[in-house]
Amino acid sequence: MAFVTPPPLASGDRVAVVAPSSGGARSAPHVLSLALDRLRDRFDLDPVVHPTARQGDDFLAAHPRGRAAAVHEAFRDPEIRAVFATIGGDDQLRVLRYLDPAVLREHPTRFFGMSDNTNLNLYLWREGVVSYNGGQLLNQVGTPGRFPAFSERYLRRALFEESLGDLDSAPRWTDDTVEWADPDYAETTPEYEPAPDWTWAGGDERVEGRVWGGCLAIVDWHLASDRYLPALERLDGQVLAIETAEDLPSAAEVRWSLMCMGERGLLERFDAVLVGRPQTRNRFERPSRETRERFRRDQREAVLSQLARYNPEAPVVFDLDFGHTNPTVPLPVGGRVDVDPNEGTIRFT
C-alpha cells in the first residue's frame, strides 16, 4: 500500500480538537485553554473544539461510537487541516471498530496524539496515512511553565513542513509533574535536568524505513487483540519505535513484551529500533535520582537482551525525545526515517 503524508498546514488554518480517548480536558479546562492559546499565539492556527473535547470520562467511555464519529467529522471537514487529541487514556482500542477506513484514506489529515492515541496512529499506519505520535494538547502543547523551544521547533516542522528533517537531542528534559489542580499551573516550571546523549547499540549498517509503533502498552494491545495489525510482511525492513508510559512498567514487563514480539516472528522484521526516553516518576511515585537512573538502565538492558536474541543486526538508539517526557518530537508514524549508526544521525525524509 502506498503511504500518503497529509498536506502541510499554512498560517491561519483551522485545526480540530477532539477527545478520542478520555475526558481529561473537562477536568482541566485551564490546561486546555493554555494549549489552545499556544496554538493561536505561537503557531497562528485557528483551533475548533469539538463537543467531545469538553465531555467527561464517563460520557466518553459510554460512547466509543461517538468518539469515532468525531474523528470522522474532523477528517471529512475540508476546512480542517490537522486534528489534535486532547489527552490519552486507557480504552481507545474500543473506538477502532467504529472507524471507517475509507473516510481516513480519502480525507488524509495530520493527526497529533500519543499514549492511548497510539491506537489511532497504528490504525492510520495500516491504512497508509502518516500521523504524528506527539503534539498532544494537555500534556505536551499545554505543558506548564515556558513552552520548550525544542518542542516548538519540531511541532512547527510537523505542522508546516513535508518532513521533520534531522533529529537532534534536547538539551534538557523532564518527567516531573505539575498537578493540574495547581492554581499556578501555567506559571509553574517543572524540574528539568541535563539530557544524556543518545545511546547506540546493535548493528552498524545504515537503515531506511517507515516508522511503526509508539507507546509499548498500546503495541501490546494490538498484538493481543490481533484485529488491527497490518499484514506482517508490510513491516519487513521498517523501523520500530517504542516508549513506555507513566504507569512505569518494570524492566521485566518490557522484556516480556519484546520476547513475545520475538516469539511471534515480529521483532526480527524491523531493520532498526528507536526507543524514547522512559518516564521514571509520576504523581504517585517520586523515586530518588539513583533509583530513576537505575530504572532507565534496567529498561535499556531489557530491550537489548531481546534484540540480541531475536534481531542482533538491527541498530537501536535509546533516549530519544518522544513519548511521555518533555520536551518532545511528534514522531511521524508511517514517515520515512534514515538511521545511520556510523554517523550517529537520525533523519526523517
Image: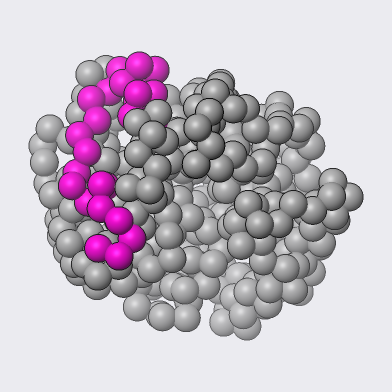
Question: Residue 192: which quarter of the image?
Answer: top right
Q: Position of residue 270 (x, y in %)?
A: 58, 62
Question: Does residue 41 belong to the magenta stretch?
Answer: yes
Q: Position of residue 349 (x, y in %)?
A: 47, 35
Against 98, is 36 above or below? above
Residue at 65% in and 52% down: 282
Q: For residue 204, say whether it is visible.
A: no
Question: Residue 308: which quarter of the image?
Answer: bottom right
Question: Residue 99: which quarter of the image?
Answer: bottom left
Q: Position of residue 241 (x, y in %)?
A: 57, 54
Against 277, is 217 above or below? below
Residue at 53% in and 37% down: 182
Residue at 56% in and 42% down: 179
Q: Position of residue 133 (x, y in %)?
A: 45, 47
What is the basis of the colouring in this image?
Answer: one colour
Residue interval drawn in magenta: 35-59
Q: Please, which residue is most extreme toward the right here?
A: 290
Question: Does residue 346 belong to the magenta stretch?
Answer: no
Q: For residue 174, say whether it is visible.
A: yes
Residue at 56% in and 48% down: 323
Number of numbered discs present? 0
Apparent side of residue 175 relative to residue 110 in the rendered image (left or right): right
Apparent side of residue 168 relative to residue 58 in the rendered image (left or right): right
Quadrant of the rendering where the N terminus is positioned: bottom left
Apparent side of residue 7 relative to residue 330 in the rendered image (left or right): left
